Amino acid sequence: MAGWPAVLDELVEKRRPALVGYAYVYTGDVAAAEDLVHDAILRTFSKPRGLVAVPQAEAYVRRAIATIFVNGTRRHRRFVERMHLLAEPESDAVPDSPVGRDEVHEALLGLSPRERACAVLRFYEDLPVAEVAEALGISHGAAKRYLSDASVKLRERLGPRLGLGDEHRGAPVGGPGAGKRGK
Amino acid sequence: MGDIRESIDRIVERGQRAYAAAGPPAPDSAFYARRARRAVRARAAALAAGGVAAAALAVLAVMAVLPRPGGSVEPAGRPGSPVWRSDVGSEMFGTPLVSEGRLYVGADDGRVRALDLADGSEAWAFDAGGPVRGAITTDGRLLFALADDGVLHAVRDGGTAAVPEWRLDLADTVVLRGVYDAYGSAPVVVGDALVLGTADGVVHAVSARDGGLLWSFRTGGPVRTSAAVGDGVVFVGSDDGFLYALDPATGAELWRHGFGQPVTASPGFHDGVVVAGSRGTEVRGLDAATGEVLWRHSLAPSWAEASPVFVDGLAVFGSSSAGMVTAVDARTGEERWQAFVRGWPWARPTEADGVVYAVTVLTGDAVSWPYTVYALDASTGTPLWQAATGDALEWEPDGRSVGALAGPVVADGLVVVAGLDGFVTAFAAGSAPPGQSPGP
């Protein structure tokens, strides 16, 4: 078993792109995603947690990404250490178009931060509602409500074509698109 | 059609590809290891000392050694206390307007308020129907406010109420804001016209008298800046990365200058020079007649989110994460002084009687530093005093935030700040902290 420095080393060197990709789902912006990953790594390794394996550490970092995103407590890098990431040099050329996003990402980014985090943790990470609530430090009822709201909004935006499951269906909202469906 | 998990997988992959293609250099694992050991040591020391206070001190100790780009860590001035505070109850981003003993300010609750400058009491509030994030302006007869929904309102101060004169719906597009898109365009009076920008990327000129549309000019991105006017030309920045010089009579483009990054701070004009920054790293001085770059001042690695005020031939502007206010010769760009302040001094500073007033917004760790209003000696940048405003109500690029994004105004011996805390706060203007005599 490796000690935490070796785990940290492998996590940072090999898993950071995947973590940035994961954070990008939340932020819709690569620089902000990298910021989020930075803070999540700092948070994960700022306490002795007995981290001896990369998958275990990565799970911590992913939870930290969700909670930091929701709670908005990103710290060090924003103010001082990530200054170089905030700014990009000018060019006199015509600016490039922003990185394209697909419809699903736009729909996710249209959710509130808590709805988005609940949706990603439940529908992508496949966490039970109780663990979604625990990861985000909110009540079970609140997590269900956010998931329900997120589901309704995603269906309204994307139509009844994504497998969101039925367990978090709230009271019907809107027209026939809000009706129950199975996958 | 795949399910949500597959869709998100594709988003993750896209993020990975974008990071791999354009990701900036990131700290290595040794950096994180050092930080982790430091945090663990600080935590252990705090626990050994036994208490929340010790823990807070440990955090502050770590903060205090965070590198800053030269200069002092904190200003030497003393805290000032307010003369009055008026509870608006909603964040304010637009610089207030002072006219004839009244202060007018827009807020995120969609209301434009008139306050008595003497004591901050509210005379009236006008519902603009959407957040008003630009400054309130006047032509001496009417007050003008642009709401986020693209409606321009013209009202008259009727003493105890605002009297609507006309309104003009300028855009179908409501302003959509990312985390840093704090500001909104404000109408600027140019002769008998108002010039302003909207979220659909259009610069409009409107008759101040009756709201008739005079001309419009389309840019390639939302226009969140307010125009500068000089030498008979209108200068306005767009999120498309260009600063445009327009003919105020026709809206014809005279020249454009590409910053390559969104021009999110309002430009300034002084003596034939347009001074503007962007979400790049340079503040630039441009020849107002041609758009030629006369000088560049780098704030790297910070954004140059900086609107200038001009003081005795100096252009004085803030920054973003660099946390400093800078004065350069407006003609040559030669640096005269820099003052370090805690936080991001995004707003346009103001100056009166040899004192520059600047405000900052703070987030994250920085919230342990309470002061966000700074008085600086205009000729040297020396900090004279500093003062606090409260926490933000909702605006949170990074979580909890404090301070002000609206520029300060000085009138009748007061420096007035419209804060993110939902209060308008007035301090005694001058070189000494309010209620105190000047230091030795």
Image (spheres, coloured by chain):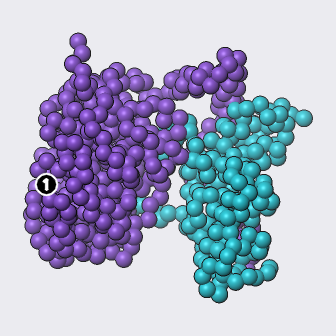
Chain colours: A cyan, B purple
**Quadrant of the rendering where the N terminus of chain A is positioned:** top right
Q: Position of residue B144 (x, y in %)?
A: 21, 63
Q: Does dot 1 land on a helix, a strand or a loop?
A: strand
Q: Position of residue A39 (x, y in %)?
A: 62, 41
Residue at x 20% of width, y 70% of height: B164
Image quadrant in which you'd find residue B246? bottom left
Residue at x 62% of width, y 58% of height: A114
Looking at the image, residue B21 sits to the left or right of residue B167; the answer is right
Q: Position of residue B434 (x, y in %)?
A: 25, 27
Residue B415 sits above or below residue B279 on the image: above
Looking at the image, residue A56 sits to the left or right of residue B272; the answer is right
Residue at x 16% of width, y 56% of height: B229
**Quadrant of the rendering where the C terminus of chain A is positioned:** bottom right
Which residue is at the front of the view, B365 or B323?
Answer: B365
Name the kind of residue labelled 1 in the image: Gly
Looking at the image, residue A133 sits to the left or right of residue A55; the answer is left
Residue at x 14% of width, y 63% of height: B158
Q: Residue furthest bottom?
A: A176
Residue B397 sits above or below residue A169 on the image: above
Residue B366 sits above or below residue A152 on the image: above
Image quadrant in which you'd find residue B187? bottom left
The residue singled out by tag 1 in the image is: B230
